Amino acid sequence: MRVLIIKTSSLGDVVHTLPALSDAQKAIPDIEFDWVVEEAFAAIPAWHSAVNEVIPVALRRWRKALFASATRRQWRTFKQRLQAKQYDLVIDAQGLLKSAWLTAKAHGPSHGYDRQSAREGLVASTYQVSHRVAREQHAIDRVRSLFAAALGYPLPAGRPDYGIARDSANIDETQLVFLHGTTWPSKHWPEEYWRRLATIAAGAGYRIVLPSGNAEERERAQRLADNNEMIQAAATMDLEGMAELLASSAGAVAVDTGLGHLAAALALPTVSLYGSTDPSLTGTRGQYQAQLAAEFECAPCLQRQCRYNKPAAVSPACYQSLQPQQVWDKLQQLVQEKEGNK
């Protein structure tokens, strides 16, 4: 059985789709997936054994130069790859207008969320078959439910299986990764807290690696690494490099970021921190994972910017309820739990 998945972005959303592939692979042993995904995340689907072909798309980049000859040429090449096969099923696992548009161009019966379930309800009318999937559940559960309904097998229970286990022979038990970069300003844990957590970790004999994806993150990493030989501000790396770094580490601390979901998929002991966002809907899921949510009068606000206007110890204000020692204690608990299971 040959199925095409349309799930283009973002990093976390792409990772959230992997357990649905594992479910389908167990239910339908001969199933094979192709996957349309944004070029920046094309490495991820290829890590799953059920994926035959990854078809990168560059909608984000093409939007910046819609009428350029290079864009038109690249679109034609992409469209030829998209339409080169007849699929038994095409599943839009994103539920947006852009993903529905791509779904309609593929060859095969189209499935997606119904009007009440999709993030952009208008897309439901474009599918040949639409499915009701409750919105008041975690994103991973929504995709697993959609695949089960579209492919006709009972929804499995239990912890999600991401299907991308890495070699654990080269784990550095003294290395931690702090995933400090994220998009919304309201998701950023205060820099002062990162510094205090790094001091605690270094005092316990750990080395800390601080990855960066842009200039702002590199500057923050360098500030945190200054005058502390136990902290390394790492060079920018691709997703393959990030996966290797995470898989070879003892644990991680993350804000609400796609790389936190990658750490969860790799079963790396990880404490993820949530202030403005709600972990019950989009938090990390998997083995050796903990989600610490701010307990504050306006959390989760679901706002990009912190709008709290009263005196507060830090900004965003909600994070004053998530102290470094609390985070450290939880991380140590997870690391010890994994050690005990070896």
Image (cartoon, rainbow, N blue to C red):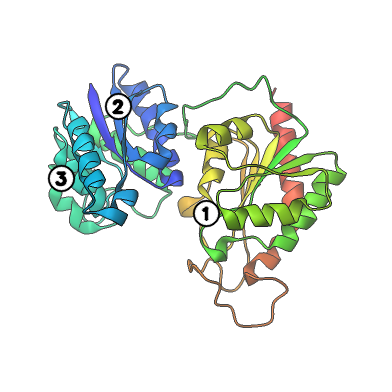
Q: Residue flagged by tag 1: what amino acid is it?
A: Pro
Mark pair 1, 3: CA separation: 30 Å
Element marked by disc 1: helix
Going from the N terminus, do you reach mark 2 or mark 3 first?
2
Q: Earlier in the sequence, mark 1 or mark 3?
A: 3
Residue that numbered label 3 is attached to: 127
Question: Residue 187: percent from the left, percent from the top?
Answer: 56, 61
Q: Can the viewer see residue 275?
A: yes
Which of the labelled discs sits on residue 33, or is there none?
2
Q: Amino acid at mark 3?
A: Tyr
How crowded pointer 2 is (Cα within 10 Å; few <14, some 14-19, many 20+) is rated as: many
Q: Nearer the viewer, mark 1 or mark 3?
A: 3
Q: How many marks?
A: 3
The mark closer to the camera, 2 or 1, is 2
CA gap, disc 2 and disc 1: 29 Å
Would residue 326 be seen by someone viewing this image from the given angle? no
How busy is the neighbourhood of tag 1: few (under 14 within 10 Å), some, or many (20 plus)? some
Q: CA distance from mark 2 to mark 3?
A: 19 Å
Residue 198 location (% of width, % of height): 78, 50
Q: Is residue 269 left or right of residue 150?
A: right
Give the percent coordinates (x, y) of residue 94.
Answer: 31, 47
Q: Quadrant of the N terminus?
A: top left
* Residue under the image location 29 percent in, 16 percent down: 30
* Direction from residue 259 to residue 295 in the image, left or right: right
Residue hosting label 1: 279
Q: Which mark is residue 139?
A: none
